Image (tube, helix red, strand yellow):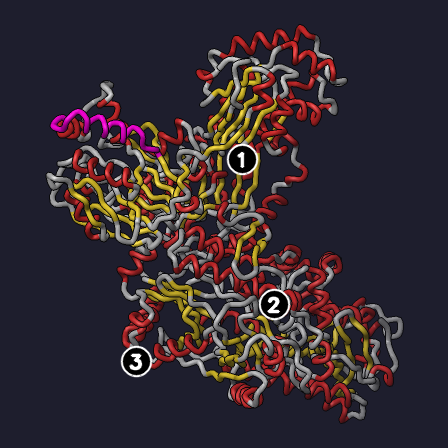
């Protein structure tokens, strides 16, 4: 390209994510060019940075600091994946090298745009600007530097050098951005992702057949393409070649599919090496390469060349489905998604290798998947395993077909695995196939998953903030007391009480609950509130389910947890006893089939209260009663004697009597919820909601349906463990309300704690999921024995519920997210973040009596 | 807070929800009504005294020549008590609303007694100096004294002071167990002022509770001026100790609220003090620190991570040794870190010294980048506080991810427990989830070493018993 002769305006294409380095002498029009073609925030100019550190854009003494700042800003933007343009003269090689390095260290491409303007024009422009006092000599010297650089710019590491020769070309140029080669986000599937084929053509044909593909054959009966009637697209994770019996056959089929647009393919390390061998480079013909070369030798030259070009042109990784699916042969860490550099390519082909080798001479790979926290699913191969398992939203599909294992496909987005067995062992493995579980320790979470101020997204209430101090409190409880996080998939939210009642003698009354839901729901359910301890049960159909689905490696094969995530029983046998009984009841009720699941999470109450809270009851409630019942009668006796002496203590004596009867009532209340247990004898479990089953978050407001399942479960229980939850459905605004109120009064008179009123709805609006209406006597153990005294009630009715309600709703929203994630088998750390947040919110200072 | 007229005092107050705490003092000295003179409260009047937490009443259920009884009743305003507690601690747990304070003869009664009978307590009477100076037959009754230590401690505290003690535990209503309240009756020939002083000091000592509502400065003053009887008391150590313990009790954090949510009374003693209860008589923790320091020195480490540093005893030893240039204490409890910060006097530490030390909140079951890059890590009496099911996560975090060259682990040797008089299944500390025999620890340590590429050497720490071994076992792991 030479100046003057340019007639067509030049179109400059830069990658969407890249560093663009402008090169040109002072006065060449860089800032104008940048302002014309890029957003102001994309352009970082050295003059601007000089101004920031010296309050003077022309202060040359500040240049060193200015460039430090410039590099910092550029580095930050690149790390965050933002296109960035550097507006500085960049005529010296050293300045450019630093920028190329910066781009490389963030794994982005770097383009140069050279504004090669005649020195006379630049000098003229500078003269017209009052803030530029560069002499002509400086401009000419810079121009000489620039001319000298032009030849070797490409070698400095720029992907492309866009040379704009002359002021006119600069003014006329257009800039467009191009997608990265990795970026195939427009491909939304559905996909059938296929693991390492390694020359196993017969197995590949069988697998495609099982997946519903129709294979197209040529005159010789060779598979040359395939299509899926539902328009699915195949994605090969690389390593099509080597080791197996028919590498050319596999290539022929896959090349045909890719050409026809029914398949995508990434490069594997075996393709990479085979291409080098076909290019005539010296490579060791090991790991099955010799077989490929021999098989390809039997093909004609045209096929060999076509195969070579195909394999050479494969990308090392692809971004699919709007960016939520990443395919790379050996996997890819999140920082590398969509990036381009030697390091990214090496990772995608070989994995996160350390350079060390293991006892079999194979490279040691770091378990990048365990640290993976990205939102995109990563599908890969490369490391043969027995059974593919999701680890933090990543999955390896290499099941060692050529070693006599299986060829595995993943249906996406369904996330179903389909596999065919190898016909035989085609190649002897260096190392025996090992289950992936040996390398996996999904129970290990990272402190950065939970610590510090956190903002968690919820569908129901938007962002929920967890403060660092609450996270700190939760960290201690979680670490010291909570069960294994693999068992801790949900914590129940706190529940707010109703507005204070204005009915004489009552602090809480059903009327306020009905009033609160009127207009928001047609119908509510009033559920008996069992007075025990809240429990969450993870019930698996059998130990295999617990192992496979939740990665548990020891009994109990499920969980029975308290509100703070602690195992209910120290004795594992008791937990197992409860879980077995529930599982048996579920089987007898046909619930596994009805709910199409092998496991369920249940929200329950475990009784008696004393089973878990014995120490608390003794310490807090019985101790108070002991003191009160010892002191009050003695005080009454003293006052009686004083009165007998003629002293006027009538008021004091009357008050003392009243306190004594209150204390007697208090002592009666907590004793109702205590009874002795021996092992599981005496223990009752009252489930009241199915929270989640395989693939389904069921924590909705369809309480009619929930209770039907629960009733089926309790009815089928032959062990006497499960306890029914009594309820009444109420059509709001009808006589149902009065009847339910009477029912509540009877329930409480019978010793009940009270009830919970929940809206019955089809959808899940932003609404309190339930309101508790506690019984008058029960509340003595919450508000103190004497809370029923009229003057005390007046004060207590002023209680503030706002914070409690907000806490209840936020915890509910977090819990719903945890259940969504659990249902879809999301990475443990994601579930744990939400569960942890519920515990953290529980440590917020809220009136504990609410 | 003075004497108010009878009529006013008997006005029924609106808005009160009062409760009773009771103390009666009876004398059979003749004339028994002298009691009123000494107490400076007339037997024929009913008097009330405003207290910060309610009202104290004094009346006489009997006032004859032969026998006279003064009763001190407290009407405690629980709401006011809860409010003042919340203000003082910034904390909110149910315990602040439902507790025994309104009924039990605790520090509240002591405070009221101190104020209402302040003159009598001095032992100086202008009116009847000889009476005040003399011992007299007294009988004191308290129906519900909260007492950590049961009836026996009541006897041990009062008998050396010349009292004949009748003490019975009050049963827990609904449970086949005793409450921590004791019904107490004291009889003796004692000077009235001494009797009042005994109660004033010993009621809070018996209670040993976190009584937020007592002015600690006043208590201190009293302990100092507790008089000769306190200095000569055989349990003066326990008396002083319990007072000192109360000073720490103001801080309650979010943790306390979670504790209540958990419906369990968690012991946090392991954080406050790593001396196990069974080991209290031994300086074992010092021997243990010595053993860990020796192992660290032998490893040649310059940077050390103390995982589960607690209140910082090992950190203090490390700071004293200049070979350790980088010391980090990590604990899962922010309260423990606060204690370490105070114990190590971080705020007064010199800049260079301060730069050597870092305290961080972290958990051994969460992988943590901050744990990496140390020459050595120490888990001193930590693993036994983890549920066994969580050990693999800890191993992964420490041995798999942090991977210091040396890891030192100490834990109790269960075989030695019998030497502490502990039963077969008893443990040294309430929070211990397990205590291992020597072969169990060795098997675990060797398994960890094999899985993570370490060598391990196991030593006993402390006195050696030919059969049971040493009280503590220590594993020193290292790798190339």
Q: Nearer the viewer, residue A307 or A634?
A: A307
Give how far across and how far down residue B221 sits, in percent.
75, 57
> Is residue A149 among what the camera can see?
yes
Residue at the spot 27% in from the left edge and 27% down from the top edge: A309
Write down the residue under mark 1.
A82
N-term-proximal mark, 3 vs 1: 1
Q: Residues within 10 Å of mark 2 (few under 14, many from 20)?
A: many
Q: Which residues are magenta?
A: A297-316
Q: Quadrant of residue A694?
A: bottom left
Q: Secondary structure at mark 1?
A: loop
> What residue is at 72 percent from the left and 75 percent from the top?
B76
Q: Chain of mark 3?
A: A
Circle nearer the viewer, 3 or 1: 1
**Residue A378, label in figure:** none
Q: Are marks 2 and 1 on the same chain?
A: yes
Q: Looking at the image, how many numbered discs can be counted on the residues?
A: 3
> Which is nearer the N-term, disc 2 or disc 3?
3
Q: Position of residue A498 (x, y in %)?
A: 61, 76
Residue B390: where, in percent of width, then height?
39, 52
Q: CA distance from mark 2 to mark 3?
A: 39 Å
Query: A403 or A253, which lies in front?
Result: A253
Q: Residues within 10 Å of mark 3 (few under 14, many from 20)?
A: few
Q: Earlier in the sequence, mark 2 or mark 1?
A: 1
* Residue position for label 2: A805
- Helix, strand or loop for disc 3: loop
């Amino acid at each position: 390209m030479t100046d003057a002769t340019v007639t067509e305006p030049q179109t400059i294409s830069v990658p969407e994510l890249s560093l663009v380095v402008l090169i040109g002498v002072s006065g060449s029009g860089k800032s104008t060019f940048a302002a014309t073609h890029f957003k102001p925030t994309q352009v970082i100019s050295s003059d601007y940075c000089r101004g920031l550190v010296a309050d003077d854009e022309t202060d040359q003494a500040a240049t060193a600091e200015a460039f430090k700042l410039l590099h910092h800003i550029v580095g930050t933007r690149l790390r965050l994946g933002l296109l960035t343009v550097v507006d500085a003269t960049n005529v010296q090689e050293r300045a450019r090298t630093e920028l190329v390095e910066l781009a490389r260290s963030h794994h982005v491409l770097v383009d140069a745009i050279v504004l090669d303007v005649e020195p006379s024009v630049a000098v003229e422009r500078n003269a017209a600007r009052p803030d530029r006092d560069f002499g002509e000599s400086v401009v000419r010297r810079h121009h000489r530097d620039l001319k000298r650089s032009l030849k070797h710019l490409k070698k400095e590491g720029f992907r492309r050098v866009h040379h704009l020769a002359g002021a006119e070309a600069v003014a006329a140029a257009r800039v467009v951005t191009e997608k990265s080669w990795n970026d195939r986000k427009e491909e939304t599937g559905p996909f059938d992702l296929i693991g390492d084929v390694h020359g196993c053509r017969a197995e590949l044909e069988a697998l495609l057949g099982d997946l519903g593909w129709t294979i197209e054959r040529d005159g010789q009966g060779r598979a040359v393409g395939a299509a899926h009637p539902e328009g699915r697209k195949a994605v090969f994770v690389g390593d099509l070649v080597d080791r197996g019996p028919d590498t050319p056959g596999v290539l022929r089929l896959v090349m045909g599919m890719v050409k026809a647009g029914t398949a995508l393919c990434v490069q594997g390390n075996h393709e990479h090496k085979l291409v080098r061998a076909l290019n005539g480079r010296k490579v060791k013909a090991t790991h099955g390469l010799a077989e490929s070369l021999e098989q390809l030798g039997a093909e004609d030259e045209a096929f060999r060349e076509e195969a070579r070009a195909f394999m050479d042109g494969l990308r090392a990784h692809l971004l699919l489905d709007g960016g939520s699916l990443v395919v790379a042969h050996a996997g890819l860490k999140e920082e590398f998604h969509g990036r381009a550099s030697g390091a990214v390519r090496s990772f995608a082909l070989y994995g996160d290798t350390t350079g060390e080798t293991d006892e079999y001479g194979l490279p040691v790979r770091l378990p990048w998947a365990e640290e993976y926290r990205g939102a995109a699913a990563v599908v890969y191969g490369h490391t043969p395993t027995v059974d593919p398992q999701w680890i933090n939203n990543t999955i390896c599909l290499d099941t060692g077909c050529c070693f006599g294992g299986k060829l595995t496909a993943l249906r996406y987005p369904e996330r179903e695995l389909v596999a065919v067995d190898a016909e035989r062992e085609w190649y002897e493995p260096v190392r025996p196939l090992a289950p992936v579980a040996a390398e996996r320790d999904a129970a290990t979470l990272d402190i950065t998953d939970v610590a510090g101020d956190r903002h968690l997204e919820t569908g129901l209430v938007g962002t929920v903030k967890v403060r660092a101090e609450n996270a700190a409190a939760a960290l201690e409880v979680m670490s010291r007391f909570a069960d294994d996080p693999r068992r801790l998939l949900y914590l129940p939210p706190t529940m707010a009480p109703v507005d204070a009642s204005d009915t004489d003698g009552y602090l809480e009354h059903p009327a306020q609950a009905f009033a609160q839901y009127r207009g928001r729901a047609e119908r509510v359910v009033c559920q008996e509130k069992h007075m025990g301890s809240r429990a969450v049960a993870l019930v698996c159909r059998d130990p295999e389910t617990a192992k496979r689905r939740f990665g548990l490696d020891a009994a109990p094969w499920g969980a029975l947890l308290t509100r703070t995530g602690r195992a209910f029983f120290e004795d594992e046998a008791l937990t197992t006893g409860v879980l077995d009984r529930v599982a048996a009841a579920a089987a007898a009720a046909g619930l596994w089939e009805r709910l199409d699941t092998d496991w369920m999470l249940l929200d329950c109450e475990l009784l008696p209260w004393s089973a878990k809270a014995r120490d608390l009851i003794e310490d807090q409630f019985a101790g108070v009663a002991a003191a009160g019942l010892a002191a009050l009668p003695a005080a009454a006796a003293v006052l009686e004697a004083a009165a007998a002496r003629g002293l006027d203590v009538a008021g004091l004596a009357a008050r003392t009597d009243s306190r004594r009867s209150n204390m007697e009532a208090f002592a009666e209340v907590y004793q109702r919820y205590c009874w002795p247990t021996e092992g599981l004898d005496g223990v009752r479990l009252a489930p009241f909601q199915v929270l989640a089953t395989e693939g389904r978050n069921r924590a909705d407001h369809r309480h009619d349906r929930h209770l039907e399942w629960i009733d089926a479960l309790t009815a089928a229980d032959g062990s006497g463990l499960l306890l029914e939850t009594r309820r009444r459905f109420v059509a709001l605004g009808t006589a149902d309300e009065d009847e339910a109120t009477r029912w509540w009064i009877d329930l409480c008179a019978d010793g009940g704690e009270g009830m919970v009123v929940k809206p019955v709805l089809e959808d899940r609006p932003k609404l309190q999921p339930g309101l508790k209406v506690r019984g008058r006597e029960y509340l003595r153990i919450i508000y103190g024995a004497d809370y029923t005294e009229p003057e005390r009630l007046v004060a207590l009715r002023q209680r503030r519920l706002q914070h409690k309600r907000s806490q209840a709703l936020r915890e509910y929203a977090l819990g719903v997210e945890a259940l969504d994630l659990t249902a879809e088998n999301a990475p443990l750390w994601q579930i744990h973040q939400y569960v942890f947040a519920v515990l953290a919110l529980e440590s917020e200072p809220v009136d504990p009596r609410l | 807070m003075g004497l108010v007229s009878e009529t006013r005092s008997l006005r029924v107050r609106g808005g009160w929800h009062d409760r009773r705490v009771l103390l009666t003092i009876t004398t059979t000295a003749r004339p028994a009504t002298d009691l009123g003179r000494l107490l400076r409260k007339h037997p024929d009047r009913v008097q009330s005294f405003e207290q910060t937490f309610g009202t104290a009443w004094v009346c006489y259920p009997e006032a004859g020549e032969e026998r006279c009884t003064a009763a001190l009743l407290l009407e405690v305003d629980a709401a006011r008590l809860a409010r003042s507690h919340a203000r003082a601690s910034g904390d909110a747990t149910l315990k602040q609303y439902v507790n025994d304070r309104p009924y039990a003869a605790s520090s509240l009664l002591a405070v009221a007694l101190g104020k209402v009978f302040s003159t009598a307590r001095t032992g100086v009477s202008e009116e009847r100096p000889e009476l005040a100076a003399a011992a007299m037959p007294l009988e004191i009754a308290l129906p519900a004294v909260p007492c950590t230590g049961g009836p026996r401690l009541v006897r041990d505290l009062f008998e050396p002071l010349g009292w004949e003690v009748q003490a019975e535990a009050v049963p827990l209503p609904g449970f086949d167990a005793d409450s921590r309240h004791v019904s107490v009756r004291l009889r003796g020939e004692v000077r009235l002022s001494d009797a009042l002083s005994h109660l004033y000091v010993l009621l809070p000592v018996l209670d040993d509770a976190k009584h937020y509502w007592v002015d600690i400065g006043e208590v201190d003053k009293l302990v100092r001026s507790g008089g000769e009887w306190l200095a000569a008391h055989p349990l003066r150590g326990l008396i002083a100790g319990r007072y000192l313990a109360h000073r720490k009790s103001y801080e309650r954090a979010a943790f306390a609220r979670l504790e209540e949510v958990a419906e369990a009374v968690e012991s946090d003693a392991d954080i406050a003090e790593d001396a196990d209860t069974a080991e209290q008589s031994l300086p074992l923790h010092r021997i243990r620190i010595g053993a860990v320091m020796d192992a660290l020195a032998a490893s040649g480490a310059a940077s050390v991570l103390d995982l589960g540093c607690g209140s910082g005893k090992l950190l203090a030893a490390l700071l004293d040794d200049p070979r350790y240039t980088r010391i980090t204490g990590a604990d899962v409890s922010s309260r423990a870190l606060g204690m370490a910060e105070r114990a190590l006097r971080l705020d007064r530490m010199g800049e260079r010294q301060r730069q050597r030390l870092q305290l961080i909140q972290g958990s051994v079951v969460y992988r943590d980048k901050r744990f990496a890059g140390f020459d050595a890590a120490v888990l001193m009496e930590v693993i036994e506080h983890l549920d066994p099911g969580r050990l693999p996560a800890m191993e992964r975090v420490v041995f798999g991810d942090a991977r210091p060259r040396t890891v030192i682990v100490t834990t109790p040797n269960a075989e030695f427990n019998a030497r502490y008089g502990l039963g077969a299944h008893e443990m040294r500390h309430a929070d211990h989830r397990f205590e291992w025999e020597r072969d169990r620890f060795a098997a675990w340590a060797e398994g960890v070493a094999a899985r993570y590429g370490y060598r391990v050497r196991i030593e006993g720490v402390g006195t050696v018993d030919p059969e049971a071994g040493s009280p503590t076992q220590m594993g020193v792991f290292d790798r190339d």
